[in-house]
Image (cartoon, grey):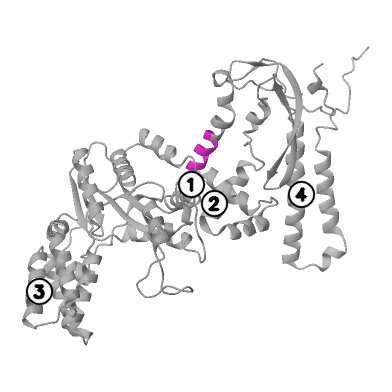
């Protein structure tokens, strides 16, 4: 009989787990427990429950056997591993630390292979993939210190801070491949809005000096400050690296008039919400690379270009040039819209020059010119502002906000045709991307005192993007499949992991033996 089939009923009956469970019952029936409050009871049962679950997992792993194989174990290098040794390893799980005694197949000069590790999809490091998932989810929400504290309170696993950072980086490594395979298998949703919106923006992140872009790092090294303890007015630390944030979503068209926009009235209809919104950010890639990904995401959603493509920007000229160039290269009709909110901010600054007292006069000045801009008369408004400033003989410094607003309107005039956009029902504000910048970057990356490494910042941005796009669960299944491919399948000949010998089924206890009745 095979050695694995000789495992006794006692060995496979989870006796230690049963004793642990009975110990919990004894604890609950003890007189000392009758004095505990509900909160104290919950904490005590949770602590003992973790140990029970750890013991259950430990005994299950033991009962599965060491993973011996009847068939030859051949590595990807073509060498058969004929030397069998049992190797013990520890695994840190959400229930605590367990050990696994696995059959290792080796050959002189070759790396040993452990089929049981492949069967369990164990990572090469100490921490289980479930621990990694918990770390990834928590670190995407809060600081690494808070992640450690949350793990301590909600699991029995222990992960030091340095390992938390490493697990976060490993967790995000398949981000690009996940969306690439999604694009290849994309199914076009027929019930989505006819407007396909693309938007891009940038947000700075404080970095470690060695991870700044070369130009920024040199500027930081060469800059001298007037004071040692703090920056003077107008001085910059040159400590940030720009992350490029992008989003793609569909939305139903909503036809509006300039008066509707100014008053906030949508003719009785509700403001449409973005559909199938995906947001993401990268600090490692260039803006051009992120914009190229944005076009690829849009193409996967609308391969036949049946929808109306619109790009919403804040007026950044390099972004506009890149969008125009890529649209031309991909032979895509793209309508570029400069955000109306940025235009309004310029108008308010200019209006304060003419209406320094503020109040209703200033509000009326801004509303009138905003209405004209929404009617497609941006150039007219810019010229009128300048003429008014000249007639009032305003000093150059005083009229500076006026000239700045007029210049913005003139330079972006081709993208301020709001009369056409409103008539076509297109969005004219960048609220979605502004919100993404705040949520993806600001809320997590601007924790006081934080200085990010390039790989750490990129990983956190990717994990936050997955959560914001509601893709995390699907991504994690993909990530675990990739881990199996990398860590196990790729190490075997032709990618075939040999089957392990399964232990015999547990012995059944029968009260009566089968007896032959003799008359």
Query: Of the residues under marks 1 and 3, which one precedes in the sequence?
Result: 3
The answer to whether the residue labelled 4 contacts the one labelled 1, judged by CB atoms less than 8 Å apart, is no
Tell me the distance, in whole angstroms, between the alpha carbons under discs 4 and 1: 29 Å
Tell me the distance, in whole angstroms, between the alpha carbons under discs 2 and 1: 9 Å
417 left or right of 107 in image: left
The answer to whether the residue labelled 1 contacts the one labelled 3, judged by CB atoms less than 8 Å apart, is no
Q: Name the residue under label 3.
A: 386
Q: Name the residue under label 2.
A: 137
Element assignment for label 4: helix
The location of residue 354, given as percent across then percent down, is 15, 82
Query: Of the residues under marks 2 and 4, which one precedes in the sequence?
Result: 4
Pick whichever, 91 or 454, lies toward us: 454
Q: Is 306 rendered above or below residue 498?
A: below
Please state the total of marks drawn on the protein image.
4
Element assignment for label 2: helix
Q: Mark 1 points at which residue?
A: 472
The answer to whether the residue labelled 2 contacts the one labelled 3, judged by CB atoms less than 8 Å apart, is no
Element assignment for label 3: helix
Specify whether residue 430 is in view: yes
Query: Of the residues under marks 4 and 1, which one precedes in the sequence?
Result: 4
Tell me the distance, in whole angstroms, between the alpha carbons under discs 2 and 4: 24 Å
The answer to whether the residue labelled 2 contacts the one labelled 1, judged by CB atoms less than 8 Å apart, is yes
60 left or right of 368 in image: right
């Amino acid at each position: 009989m095979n050695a694995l089939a000789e495992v006794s009923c006692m060995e496979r009956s989870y006796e230690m787990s049963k004793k642990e469970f009975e110990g919990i019952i004894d604890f609950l029936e003890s007189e000392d427990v009758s004095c505990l409050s509900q909160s104290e009871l919950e904490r005590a049962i949770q602590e003992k429950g973790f140990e029970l679950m750890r013991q259950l997992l430990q005994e299950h792993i033991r009962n599965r056997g060491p993973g011996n194989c009847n068939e030859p174990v051949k590595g990807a290098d073509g060498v058969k591993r004929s030397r069998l040794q049992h190797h013990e390893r520890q695994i840190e799980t959400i229930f605590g630390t367990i050990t696994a005694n696995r059959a290792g197949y080796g050959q002189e000069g070759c790396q040993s292979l452990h089929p049981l590790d492949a069967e369990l999809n164990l990572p090469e490091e100490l921490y289980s993939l479930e621990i990694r998932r918990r770390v990834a989810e928590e670190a995407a929400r809060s600081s690494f210190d808070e992640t450690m504290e949350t793990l301590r309170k909600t699991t029995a696993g222990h992960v030091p801070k340095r390992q938390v950072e490493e697990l976060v980086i490993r967790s995000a490594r398949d981000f690009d491949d996940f969306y690439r395979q999604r694009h290849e298998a994309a199914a076009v949703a027929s019930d989505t809005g006819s407007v396909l919106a693309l938007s891009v923006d940038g947000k700075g992140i404080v970095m470690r000096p060695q991870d700044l872009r070369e130009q920024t790092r040199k500027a930081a090294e060469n800059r001298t400050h007037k004071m040692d303890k703090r920056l003077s007015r107008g001085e910059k630390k040159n400590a940030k690296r720009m992350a490029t944030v992008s989003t793609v979503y569909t939305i139903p068209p909503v036809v509006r008039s300039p008066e509707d926009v100014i008053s906030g009235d949508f003719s009785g209809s509700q403001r449409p919400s973005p559909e199938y919104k995906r947001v993401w950010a990268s600090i490692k890639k260039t803006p051009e690379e992120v914009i190229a990904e944005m076009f690829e995401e849009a193409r996967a959603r609308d391969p036949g270009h049946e929808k109306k493509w619109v790009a919403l920007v804040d007026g950044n000229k390099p972004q506009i040039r890149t969008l125009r160039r890529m649209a031309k290269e991909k032979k895509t009709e793209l309508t570029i819209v400069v955000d109306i909110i940025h235009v309004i901010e310029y108008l308010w600054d200019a209006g304060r020059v003419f209406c320094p007292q503020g109040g209703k006069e200033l509000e009326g000045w801004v509303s009138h010119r905003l209405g004209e801009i929404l009617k497609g008369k941006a150039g007219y408004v810019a010229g009128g502002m300048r003429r008014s400033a000249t007639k009032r003989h305003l000093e150059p410094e005083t009229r500076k906000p006026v000239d700045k607003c007029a210049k913005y309107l003139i330079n972006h005039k081709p993208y301020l045709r709001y009369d056409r956009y409103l008539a076509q029902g297109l969005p004219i504000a960048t609220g979605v991307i502004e919100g993404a910048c705040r949520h993806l970057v600001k809320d997590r990356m601007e924790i006081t005192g934080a200085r990010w490494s390039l790989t750490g910042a990129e990983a956190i941005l990717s994990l936050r993007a997955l959560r914001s796009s509601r893709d995390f669960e699907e991504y994690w299944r993909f990530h675990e499949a990739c881990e199996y491919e990398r860590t196990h399948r790729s190490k075997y000949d032709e990618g075939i992991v040999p089957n392990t010998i399964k232990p015999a089924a547990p012995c059944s206890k029968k009260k009566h033996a089968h007896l032959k009745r003799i008359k």
